[in-house]
Amino acid sequence: MRYPPEILDEIRARLPVSTLVAKRVRLKKAGREWKGLSPFQAEKTPSFFVNDQKGFFHCFSSGRHGDVFAWVQEIEGLTFPEAVERLAAQAGVDLPKESPRAAAEARRRRDLHDVLALAAAFFEGALKRPEAAPAAAFLTRRGLASHEVLTRFRLGYAPAERYALRDHLAAQGVPVEDMIEAGLLVTGEDIAVPYDRFRDRVMFPIRDGQGRVVSFGGRAVRPEVQPKYLNGPETPLFSKGALLFNLDRAREPAHRSGVVHVVEGYTDVIGLNRVGIRDAVATLGTALTADHLALLWRLADEPVLCFDGDGAGRRATWRAIDVALPLLAPGKSLRFAVLPPGQDPDDLARAGGRPAVDQVLGAARPLVDVLWEREASAPSDTPERRAALERRVEDLVAGISDRAVRFHYGSALRARLRDAFRPPARVYPSPERGGGRGGAARAGAGPLASPAMLAVLAGLKARSAAEPGSFDGDEEACA
């Protein structure tokens, strides 16, 4: 919905920026402005300023800037329309009435939120029943059975019965059509009676940026059940490529620490939480997307990706690089933490605790290093292969949209290409060892010569002597 400019101006006039910011940041008067520590970056010297006369906040450490609407969007993860509605209510400003269609869509979304809230409560209660004993035992083995974990993440259990959730929600007056649209039932032309999507699984509620349940992920209890992890389908409330697990809880810790850690699964997030790392989020069964990056870069300038140390984790890393490269901006990039082979973040946290996790995360590498490692890992032992490497690097750099970032990536990667292709320095024998006229090794005496290249040069010289005029200039090229 588009809001008239005069309505937005009225909200701004009634709600000084400092009034909203002061609920999250300790502000001190500084002339005509207010200042405080950045809510987006860890810092000791205040770099965050609020100017009520001009109606904006500005954070010098993170570059974030905006008005009251931008502030609420940044801090609470709201969309712009949601921020307008929230602040209009606070300011006592009446918004224009929605169109009948928009009003119906809003009511429909609220109905689906209510259905999913009922389902979350049902799964939580089911975990306490005797038939959930295998699920409770699984949670205990994985270190997920503490009261803090169960309540913080609202873990639950989907009973094995085919219609357990369906019958429970129907008894609460929920239409089957709502259950289907919320992604809770499986239906189709060949299915006479829709049945529960999640059965005999440990349940992980997936919440949006405001903390509302929008879907679920289920982990199989029995090892023979496939798939091991099952996410809800795309719905009006849930899009895998635009949401991150634990985003609502990780926002404030990420703003305080200045970093956000991205892992692959729910249990990885919970494992890191268990050792005190509260700024972790997870993708939801899909590769990292541009929408994910937009969310992450609102939390931290250089999110750290901590994917599993196996082949699948490595492929996920490569895909993340390809998604991120065109979107890089000054100060906005990624770092990559390399996990030990065969371990995921949850394994690492359970085996080594916080010290082991800190060691891995502290060694996170910048994107440019991991990109170069990927490209340079291919053989480059022939001129054609070296030319192919150079072409790949040129194409990747050309795909970076930001001109300044593109320039610096080009400079950095060209320098690495020169180093990779530069032969060892030529060394002349020293007089003390009877080396004759050449003297000691001379710095800058020119590039190289490996034994193989010296052999080629010798052959060229011999052929040149036998066939004057042949290979003109080749000696200089090889010398």
Image (cartoon, grey):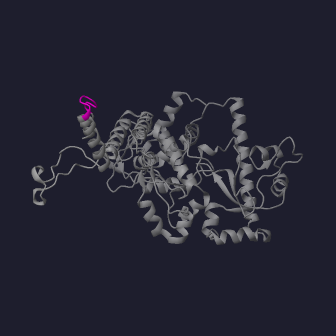
In this view, the residue in front, 214 or 383, is: 383
Total number of numbered labels? Answer: 0
Residue at x-position 17% and y-position 51%? 428
Q: Is residue 167 left or right of residue 14?
A: right
Q: Can you say whether 135 is above or below 300 in the image?
A: below
Q: Is residue 92 left or right of residue 106?
A: left
Identify the image quadrant of the N terminus: top right
Residue at x-position 55% and y-position 61%? 344
The picture places residue 357, in percent across and down from the top left corner, at 48, 65
Q: Is residue 214 visible?
A: yes
Q: Quadrant of residue 189?
A: top right
Residue 148 inside the magenta-drawn segment: no
The picture places residue 127, in percent across and down from the top left corner, at 74, 66
Residue at x-position 79% and y-position 45%? 180
Q: Is residue 175 visible?
A: no
The picture places residue 30, in percent across and down from the top left corner, at 31, 47
Q: Can you say whether 212 is above or below 6 in the image?
A: below
Q: Of all residues shown, which one is farthest toward the front?
A: 466
Q: Can you say whether 350 is above or below 368 in the image?
A: below
| Range shown magenta | 466-473
Identify the image quadrant of the C terminus: top left
Q: Quadrant of residue 80?
A: top right
What's the magenta bit mostly, secondary-structure-wise?
A: loop
Residue at x-position 29% and y-position 41%? 459
Q: Of all residues shown, which one is farthest toward the right?
A: 192
Q: Is residue 153 left or right of residue 128?
A: left
Residue 468 inside the magenta-drawn segment: yes
The picture places residue 280, in percent across and down from the top left corner, at 52, 57
